[in-house]
Image: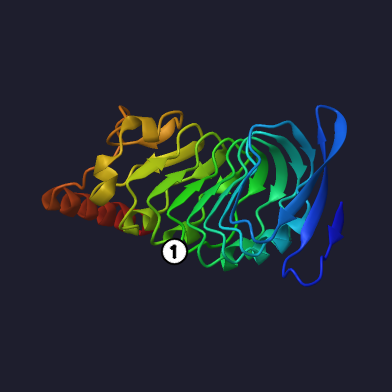
Amino acid sequence: MGVNDPGGRGFYTFSIGIVMKGQERELVKIFTMWMIIDLSNNQFEGGIPNVIGKLNLLKGLNLSHNNLHGDIPTSIGNLTSLEWLDLSSNRLSGTIPNRLADLPFLSSFNVSENQLHEVFGKLNLLKGLNLSHNNLNGGIPTSIGNVTSLEWLDLSSNILSGTIPNRLADLPFLSSLNVSENQLHGQIHQGKQFNTFGNDSYEGNKGLCGFPVSKGCNIIEPAPPNVIEKMAQNQTLLLVGKWC
């Protein structure tokens, strides 16, 4: 991969080496003045080059449906004009760089169908987030509740466990939620936008219960006051008898 600075033109020209169908090729004249780059549905192999961070005027980047592998480069955090990023259907692994949280205009992020295993911190301006079909494990981070602009969230087909965080109910614009095919458990929240999500949002989580799934929750109803009083009296008598 080479980088050339043609002086006087105010932008860089990149020559990026890629592997396509087993042959080494070059993508030339990748200009920083480009605002949208779509290289999806090819057979590109190798890692995402760090030099991608030089495209500082980029608003949209689509590298989906390739054979890219390795880590997501932290240099993507330099793309401060980026509004949407699609890295889905590759073989990317590792973690999502925290620097993506510094992108002020990023509103849509799709990294579904990769091999990622850790969720990042915060992307407060996101409207759409797709992390489906990865290897994410542990609990759903409560920090997702900070993404107050979020309209749709897809965490399906991972290895997530624990309960659904209460803070998801506080996302005012969330209209689509998919946490299916995980290992979540506990009672599904009721009220607000959770009343609009169907069974398909939760299917494949055997431990979830309550509307809209068919499995009911075994909630113990509180006993009437007179029963509690009698139980307390019996307990007192039992203790007195024991100490006497």
Label 1 sits on a secondary structure element that is helix
Q: Nearer the viewer, residue 211 or 77?
A: 77
Quarter that holds the C terminus: bottom left
- Residue for point 30% across, 39% down: 197
Q: Is residue 13 above or below residue 217?
A: below
Locate residue 206, reporting x and y percent: 44, 30
Residue furthest front in the image: 8
- Residue for point 42% across, 59% down: 145
Q: Give left or right: position of 192 versus 96.
A: left
Q: Nearer the viewer, residue 233 or 142?
A: 142
Residue type highlighted by circle 1: Asn
Locate residue 220, reporting x and y percent: 27, 42
Q: Which residue is mark 1?
A: 146
Q: Nearer the viewer, residue 16 or 147?
A: 16
Q: Hey, which quadrant is residue 233 in on the image?
A: bottom left
Locate residue 212, reporting x and y percent: 28, 34
Q: Is residue 168 above or below residue 89?
A: below
**Colour scheme of the picture:** rainbow
Q: Is residue 200 above or below residue 110?
A: above
How many numbered callouts? 1
Q: Hey, which quadrant is residue 81 in on the image?
A: bottom right
Q: Give left or right: position of 75 versus 16.
A: left
Q: Is residue 56 above or below residue 154?
A: below
Locate residue 91, reporting x and y percent: 71, 37
Q: Badge 1 local density, few (<14 within 10 Å), some, or many (20+)?
A: some
